[in-house]
Amino acid sequence: MAIKDYLLITGVSTGIGYAAAADLAGAGYHVFGSVRSQADADRLQREIPANFTPLVFDVTDEVGVETAVATITQTIQPYGLTALINNAGISTPGPLQHMPLDEFRYQFEVNLFGLLHITQQCLPLLGARPSPGHPPGRIINISSVSGQIAYPFMGAYAASKHALEAMSDSLRRELLLLGYGIEVILIEPGTVQTPIVGKFGEQIAQYMATGYGPILQNVAQEAAEREDKALPVTAVTRIIRQSLESKRPHTRYPIPRQWLTGWLLPRWLPDRWFDRLIRRKLEK
C-alpha cells in the first residue's frame, strides 16, 4: 500500500467508525479520523498507533470542518484522498407527534447537512476539479436499512437516511455528468452492535408519559433483546473495505440483520399489509 492512499473517516470514536479506522489503518491506508474531543483523539492515537491521524472537530461546526480539510490538504499534497467515508451520525428516536422540533432539526444537522458540508469541502481532494493530478476518489456514505424502510418511533432517523439516499443518488449522477470518475456509494446496515443500540431505552424515556408509553415499553424491550442479535461490526467494515477496493463497486450495499423480514418483505409488501404487521407486533 503506497503512502498516497489517504482516507478521511468521520465519527471514529466508537462503533463502525472506530472499527473501520482500525481495520483500514491496519491494511496500510493512512486514516484521518474525526473525533469530538481531545481525550478521544489521545485515546485513539494510543489504540491505533500506526497510519492514523485524529482530527478534533464536529461535523456540524462549519469552521471546524473547513480547518480540518485544510490541514488534510496541506498534509497530503500532491496526492488526493482515496476516499471520504461519511460515518458520523446520530439516532433520535421518539414519536413524531411529540418530538421537539429542535431535536428533529439536529438529527438532520448531523446526518445530512454536516455530511454534505464535509463532502463539499473534500470534493476537490477527491478529484472534482480540472486535471487533479491523481486518480479519482470515492465517497462512501454510511446509511441504514432505515434509508429504505421507516419504522414507528424512528421517523427522524429514517427521514434523515432517506434524504441521505436521495442526496447520494443526485450527487453520483451530477459527478458523472462532468466525468470526474468519483464513485458515490451507500452502505445500508441493519442494527449493528455499537453503543448507539444500548441507548434506545434512555432516549425514549421522555415519551413514556404520552399515549405511546405502553407501546414504547414493548419497543424498548424488543430493542434490548435485539442488541444481542445485532450484526457484528465486522460485517460492516468488511463491506466498507469491499466498496473501497472493488474495481466496479455497487452503488448500494444493503446489510440487513435478517434478509427476509428485515429487508425483502418490508420493501415488497403493500404498505397497508406491512402497517398491519407492525401494529400486530408492537401491540402484543
Image (cartoon, grey):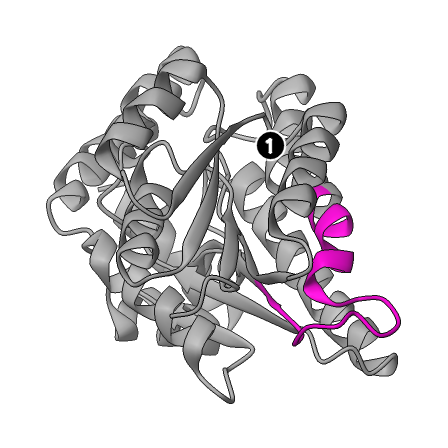
Q: On the rendered structure, is 275 left or right of 67?
A: left
Instruction: In this rendered view, identify the residue nearer to me: 6 or 149.
Output: 6
Q: Is residue 135 magenta?
A: yes
Q: Residue at x 40, y 38 (%)?
A: 12
Question: Which amino acid is tagged 1?
Answer: Gln
Instruction: In this rendered view, identify the residue nearer to me: 216 or 195.
Output: 195
Asked whether residue 7 appears in the rendered view, the answer is yes
Tell me the SS state at disc 1. Answer: helix
Q: Position of residue 262 (x, y in %)?
A: 32, 65
Q: On the rendered structure, is 93 left or right of 239?
A: right
Q: Position of residue 148 (x, y in %)?
A: 52, 63
Q: Position of residue 11 (x, y in %)?
A: 46, 37
Q: On the rendered structure, is 132 left or right of 246?
A: right
For the N terminus, the quadrant is: bottom left
Q: Residue at x 18, y 32 (%)?
A: 221
Asked whether residue 269 appears in the rendered view, the answer is no
Q: On the rendered structure, is 225 left or right of 67?
A: left
Q: Residue at x 49, y 22 (%)?
A: 36
Note whether 36 is above or below 147 in the view shown.
Answer: above
Instruction: In this rendered view, identify the residue nearer to me: 149 or 127.
Output: 127
Instruction: In this rendered view, identify the residue nearer to me: 79 or 243.
Output: 79
| Quarter where residue 102 is shown | top right
Note whether 109 is above or below 16 in the view shown.
Answer: above
**Start and end of the magenta stretch?**
118-139
Residue on which disc 1 sits: 107
Q: Is residue 256 magenta?
A: no
Q: Characterize the local packing of mark 1: few (<14), some (14-19) or many (20 or more) Cα atoms within 10 angstroms.
A: many
